[in-house]
Image (cartoon, rainbow, N blue to C red):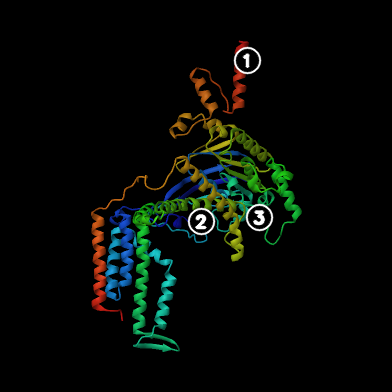
């Protein structure tokens, strides 16, 4: 439970951790775009290279990084197998009914697997190296232009940061309630799915009640201190653009250029 | 049931950057029949300790996956942690934890936040139904009479509250209902984490009186966790002081609060009566009392009468 509760933030000090969250968000979007622009193994190779550098410089242990892949391992496998068996290629190695294994099929499934892995790992690198609070700050800052169309950016950011802030608290609360009900003989582990769902009720009701109570209290506390969102508020932590961010932006532009050029000159994967 | 813990250690989030040792080699014995007090700062390991008592936190050796580790050459293994509660050995894989939880009732902090039933009756019966032997449904009469007894034992009027929603009750009543929901399964040991937290002085007094009543009639052993030194001095027959994950002292309150300097050094306070005794001591008046208000007043009055006679 705790594992989820902390988001995934891995608390060490590194080059990547110190980057501006705005930059990291932009970088992530650019990186994902690059992954989709890449049409051959050279392009993907460039992405892999950059991601490998990010992992090394972030000082997040490799085991931890690979852990994020575990959640989608099935999806990756499924995609790979389906493409391997049904891709209509020319160089047939093996055929059985409608199932064909072709050279192109193999290449394409490897390509897809790498693409999927890159997608998952790069997004989790963002959460490994950025605290939820920094992330919301970054999102708020990036969404600022939307204020022009009267979009309540600040309120949205506030909701997000409160929600993120409350996840560990609610998790703890859930665990406490679960323990209390366990102490009264509740059994959450055995029985069929319906029994288990029913067993959750004694946790869910107190948890919802406490969430509402907390929300009420927080609202009161904020109002008591005359909280007003928007223009007049200053920030405790100002986001600053440093040489690290400049360097990263350079890498980002370089990557996109490389991938585009590789796509134009080397063509598609097959 | 006697509780004997030896070499208990526990770390939260082991092998992660968030690892925090909560218990370090704790050995403690709680005799049957005590009104036992556990004192300590937040984070001293007291809550972790009590969660071991009914198996909410399991000893590693009772886990399915546990394998005995062979010591490497020259390595000295830490002594194996053991915990016995009556006849239950909590370091064994074969222990029946459901039966254990039936005999060790646990009331958490702010237990009223764990109520969920539509009616008080239903909420109190929750534990009773859970602990009923598998396959043998409790008859309605047995259930109702057990629930009625529990609700009356905590000093509530069954006819008045039984059909109400627990959320319509007052704070003190809710807490009583929550306690009833634990004692309904007739535990031999009742553990309460800060039973009086957040109540007004009268409510605190009433809860403590309730616990003494239960101690005499329902549960052989009562264990309370508390920050309030006066509460410990007034109520407990024995007490253990936790600090930084270890048991610093296990003494009767009378002996414990004589160690005022040591307690101050740990950042803890002593009961008001103990402070008065110290102040009087400095002025050359020595009063040998057990730090309960009643005893103190008795001794002071006796002293005064003695002076009057002399």
Instruction: Pinpoint residue A71: horizontal percent, then vertical percent.
Output: 43, 66
Q: Residues within 10 Å of mark 1 (few under 14, many from 20)?
A: few
Q: Earlier in the sequence, mark 1 or mark 3?
A: 3
Which of the pair B220/A16 is nearer the observer? A16
- Asked whether, in this view, residue B112 is left or right of residue A125, the answer is right
Residue at position x 57%, y 32% from top? B233
Regarding mark 1 in the picture, which secondary structure is present there? helix
Which of the pair A1/A259 is nearer the observer? A259
Q: Residues within 10 Å of mark 2 (few under 14, many from 20)?
A: some
Instruction: Pinpoint residue B219: horizontal percent, then vertical percent.
Output: 66, 43
Find residue B305 and name its label: 1
Regarding mark 2 in the picture, which secondary structure is present there? helix
Instruction: Pinpoint residue B6: horizontal percent, then vertical percent.
Output: 51, 47
Which mark's residue is nearer the viewer, 1 or 2? 1
- Asked whether, in this view, residue A104 is left or right of residue B227, the answer is left
Reading the image, the residue beneath label 3 is: B131
Q: Chain of mark 2?
A: B
Q: Chain of mark 1?
A: B
Q: Quadrant of the C terminus of chain A?
A: bottom left
Residue at position x 75%, y 55% from top? B140
Regarding mark 3 in the picture, which secondary structure is present there? helix
Which mark's residue is nearer the viewer, 1 or 3? 3
The residues bearing labels 1 and 2 have C-alpha atoms spaced at a distance of: 61 Å
């Amino acid at each position: 439970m705790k594992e989820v509760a902390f988001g995934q933030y891995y608390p060490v000090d590194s080059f990547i951790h110190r980057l501006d969250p705005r930059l990291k968000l932009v970088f992530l979007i650019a990186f994902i775009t690059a992954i989709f622009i890449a049409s051959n193994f050279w392009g993907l190779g460039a992405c892999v290279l950059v991601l490998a550098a990010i992992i090394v410089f972030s000082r997040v242990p490799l085991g931890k990084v690979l852990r994020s892949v575990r959640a989608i391992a099935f999806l990756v496998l499924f995609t790979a197998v389906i493409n391997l068996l049904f891709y209509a290629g020319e160089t047939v190695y093996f055929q059985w009914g409608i199932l064909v294994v072709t050279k192109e099929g193999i290449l394409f499934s490897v390509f897809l697997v790498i693409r999927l892995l890159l997608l998952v790992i790069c997004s989790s690198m963002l959460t490994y190296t950025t605290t939820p609070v920094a992330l919301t700050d970054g999102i708020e800052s990036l969404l600022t232009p939307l204020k022009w169309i009267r979009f309540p950016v600040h309120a949205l950011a506030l909701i997000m940061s409160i929600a993120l802030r409350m996840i560990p608290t609610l998790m703890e609360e859930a665990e406490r309630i679960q323990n209390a009900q366990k102490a009264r003989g509740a059994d959450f582990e055995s029985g069929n799915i319906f029994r288990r769902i029913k067993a959750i009720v004694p946790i869910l009701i107190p948890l919802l009640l406490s969430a509402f109570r907390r929300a009420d209290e927080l609202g009161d506390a904020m109002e008591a201190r005359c909280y007003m969102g928007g223009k007049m508020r200053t920030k405790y932590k100002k986001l600053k653009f440093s040489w690290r961010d400049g360097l990263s932006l350079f890498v980002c532009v370089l990557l996109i250029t490389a991938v585009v050029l590789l796509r134009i000159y080397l063509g598609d994967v097959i | 049931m006697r509780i004997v813990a030896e070499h208990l250690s526990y770390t939260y989030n082991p092998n992660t950057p968030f690892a925090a040792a909560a218990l370090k080699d704790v050995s403690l014995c709680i005799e049957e029949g005590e009104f036992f007090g556990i004192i300590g700062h937040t984070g001293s390991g007291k809550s972790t300790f009590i969660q071991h008592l009914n198996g909410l936190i399991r000893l590693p050796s009772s886990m399915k996956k546990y394998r005995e580790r062979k010591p490497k050459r020259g390595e000295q293994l830490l002594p194996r942690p053991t915990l016995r509660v009556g006849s239950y050995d909590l370091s064994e894989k074969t222990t029946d934890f459901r039966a254990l939880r039936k005999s060790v009732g646990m009331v958490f902090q702010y237990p009223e936040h764990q109520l969920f039933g539509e009616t008080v009756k239903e909420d109190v019966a929750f534990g009773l139904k859970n602990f009923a032997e598998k396959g043998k449904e409790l008859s309605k009469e047995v259930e109702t009479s057990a629930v009625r007894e529990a609700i009356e034992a905590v000093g509530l009027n069954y006819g008045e509250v039984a059909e109400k929603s627990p959320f319509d009750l007052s704070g003190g009543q809710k807490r009583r209902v929550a306690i009833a929901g634990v004692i309904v399964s007739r535990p031999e040991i009742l553990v309460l984490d800060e039973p009086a937290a957040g109540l007004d002085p009268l409510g605190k007094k009433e809860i403590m009186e309730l616990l003494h009543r239960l101690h005499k009639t329902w549960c052989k052993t009562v264990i309370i966790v508390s920050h309030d030194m006066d509460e410990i001095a007034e109520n407990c027959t024995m007490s253990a002081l936790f600090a930084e994950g270890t048991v610093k002292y296990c003494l009767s309150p009378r002996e414990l609060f004589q160690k005022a300097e040591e307690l101050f050094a740990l950042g803890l306070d002593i009961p008001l009566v103990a402070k008065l005794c110290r102040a009087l001591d400095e002025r050359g008046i020595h009063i040998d009392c057990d730090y309960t208000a009643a005893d103190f007043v008795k001794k002071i009055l006796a002293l005064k009468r003695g002076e009057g006679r002399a």
